[in-house]
Amino acid sequence: MRRLKAGSSEQVVWRARLVLGCLALVALCFQQAPGKILADSKVELTAAPGRFLSRALHLWDPHTAFGQVQSDAFGYLLPIGPFHWLLDALSVPDWIIQRLWWSLVLCVAFLGIWKLCNVLQYGVPWTRFAVALLYALVPRVFGELPIEVWPMAMAPWVLLPLVSPRARSGWSRASWSAVAFALIGGADPVAGVATLVVPAIWLVSRQKLKLALGWLGFVVAASIWWLVPLALLLQYGAAPPGPRWLPVIGVVIGLPLALAAAHYLPRLAGLSVSRGIHRRVVPAAVVCLAVAAAAPVVLIRPDGASAAIPAHWNAAAAWLDDQTAPGSVLLLSSTTEPLTALVTRPMAALTDDVERRVDSGVGDQTLRQELNHDGVRYVVVRNDLGDTLAIHESLADAGIGRVAYFGPAGQTTVPYPSVEIYDVGATTPGRLIPRSRLVAVDGTADDVPTVVTALDGSGSAVLRADAAGKLDGLPLIETDVRAQPVDQQPSAVVLRSQQVGRSGCLHVGVRALCSPDQARSADDPNGLSRTVELPQAASYELRGTALPKDGDALERLLPVPGAITATASSRAVTAPEGRPGAAVDRDPGTGWLADPDDATPSLTLKLPAARDVRGLRFQSDTYLEGSRPAEVRLHFDGGVPIRATVDADGYVQIAARHVQTIEIDFTATKPVQDAKRSPVGVTEVTVLGADELRKAVDPDRHVASYCGNGPTVRIDGVPARTQVEATMRDLLQRRTVPFSLCEATSVALRSGSHHVEVLAGGGLVPVETALVKAGFGDVSVTPVQGVDVWRPNPTELTVEVPDADDQSVLAIAQNYNEGWEAYDSTGQKLTPIRIGGWQQGWVLPAGPEQVVTASFMPARGYRAGLLLGLVALLAVLATAVFFRRTPRRMTGRSIRR
């Protein structure tokens, strides 16, 4: 009796300790940045769990990235998603929901190991407690998020029913294990399946093959709810995100190691006592190890914590949802969070071509046209992750204006608001494209926007491989990247430089912000050199676009007659806005900046004729990344140098003298804003006594236009001259300018291979060149029409198509997927085709106005799989509940001692 009482008392003590252990784990979770939300793998789970779960019920997600098959959202339907949704419905603060989930994960792992060791009778209570605590904490030490280690937390519970006493029936044990496996969910299928390794080994090693087969059947049945969606995802979508291997290793290796540690630690303690070591040394070492495991969780302060999703994101999402104009939203950022979780308007994906264009700082109609054809109405610029000067300049040059902004100024060169919204202009989610407006492009999806622009921008294109067998006979457009042998005469050849580089000077309005760190090299800095294959002889007209090329050829176009000229010992950037002459161009938006490695910077001013000079004035501003002159040494017409101090207003006063050349050595500087070291720079240098000789470059002045002032063209070594028309503004702000042949309207080319060179010349470097077959595109054709798209649910859409006199293509601004099927008003199935290398489209025959309906057919199997999975899971749960005990006559001896 006393022994029973002692055992009962000990159980009470250890239960209390378990409660304290769980409370300690909860405290560890809540002490990390209390009151703030930490960056997690799924922002939607915290921001809008109800909306997230609603989308997870459909295989096709029209809201994300131009529409796509769900990635892994279905895996959160149980139990992670409902947990967050329930607490959110109860108005629990977001950060508390996040910490409660973390707490649940750690406590489940802790209690699972404790119970498993108890059932297996491994170790003694203190070793079981210590090992369970370490098992729960170790993943957090390595920075793994609790959502990602949920399979590791549940692994002991998958094994536990199988090793429980034989008083339970085999069906009960197998089904309870399957229920535990189902609760892992399908968010990380690899880690989930890894939890089955140890139970399978345990069953096979004990020759319980019949139980193993039954258990495997229950596991499959309990997993149908995510196995079917996963199979459909692999068939119709991209593979789910790759697994985090630490949780997988933790499941396969960590669980056996934990059990072994619990089992052998008492033996290690006994062995240490037999060797004369105090009996408390081993327990103390284990306690220290547990404290060491908890220390990083306590001491490390995670990055990216916020009290809540910033209010300006909620305001931006609300503004976007309030707009009635159709079109998707493109966020120019490496991540679409948190906007995706907040906005109901569909989101676009940042394509490689758009990313290159906005990052170049060069915007033109190709960018705007590409966004318009993609169905993008609003562009959101995020200014809180880094400098976005190039993005702003590209959008401004493309004529895309800002319509709203939210949040405080970011930590950027220019204090832009945290979030800005730009309006691309009217667009439609669908287009009806007449066959006569289509061309077949022998290239990639990234080539399509350039091709469409080169051919007047009013049509559209399909890749040649996509048109085969569906729209044969379309005019062929050859590009740099030929995907197929040339067996058809191309109607045009479009050559381009994929990466046009970026200038060291970017612009905010008329203000140039220069820094060598901003410059990016181009793929073809000296022009285009390509080989073109033609199966037949034909004549082609040549035209293209070019960009100003930094260098002497460009700067020779800039001087104003009768003005002060300037040279310098060095310059920080090669862009014309940072040339020495920028210091005397009467433009406060430009300025000269010395090279940071120039130890003795100097600036030399030369007047058109000698004048009476009585001093200088140096002007700088906060946007010129240079230090102010503090002391100078002046040389007048090569005479004896004079040292002078620059006063607070930038003046250097000298006795009047008659001079023509002034050499300025900068011997000391002072920072403009802070104490950071930077090279000397000046926005303007005023020569007192000759200020009228500082003359501005007229931005509207046209470059002298004549045959030969453009890029140099050579075809098979034969030169041809080009002509370009541009203004000084185009040259100074690096805008694209058109060029064309000027001596002949076309070039006759024989069949075979041709080497086409379009090289830099006249201060310009070509970035795109088109050889267009004479007469191509001159015929008047039916225009492209925009159409509205109505979606009764995420997996269906309806389009009212106007009448068409010719075969057309219905293009929808969403990703192409073979799972979509469309039917016309007569019930005839339409032929699917990929438009522009990525958009969903269908070929429509000529006919009257009609209604086209389309459905994502795999969605039916997806919903059926979810329903069947729910029924199967309930059946497995019922088996676990109602077949709990083995009949008395079959009861064997418990594995407990």
Image (cartoon, rainbow, N blue to C red):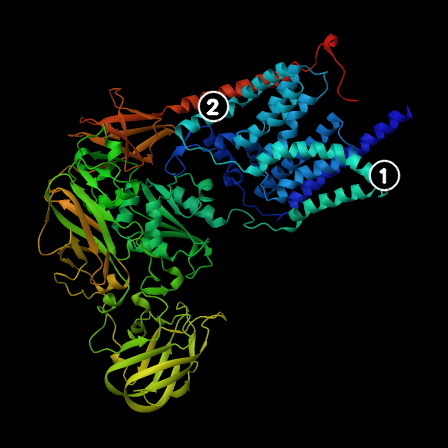
Pick whichever of labels 2 and 1 is earlier in the sequence.
Answer: 2
In the visual, does 311 lie left or right of 822? Answer: right
Which residue is depicted at the point 76% across and 15% down? 893
Query: Where residue 485 sits in the image (x, y, percent)?
Result: 22, 36
Indicate the secondary structure of the residue bearing disc 2. helix
Figure quadrant of residue 326: top left
Indicate the secondary structure of the residue bearing disc 1. helix
User: In this rendering, is residue 778 above or below 220?
Assistant: below
Q: Residue furthest right?
A: 2
Query: Where residue 308 sits in the image (x, y, percent)?
Result: 54, 47
Three-letter residue code for mark 2 = Val
In the visual, does 37 lie left or right of 706? Answer: right
Which residue is depicted at the point 39% across and 76% down? 601
For the C terminus, the image quarter is top right
Kindly identify which residue carries mark 1.
Answer: 274
Three-letter residue code for mark 1 = Ser
Q: Nearer the viewer, residue 877 or 445?
A: 445
For the N terminus, the image quarter is top right
Label at residue 228: 2
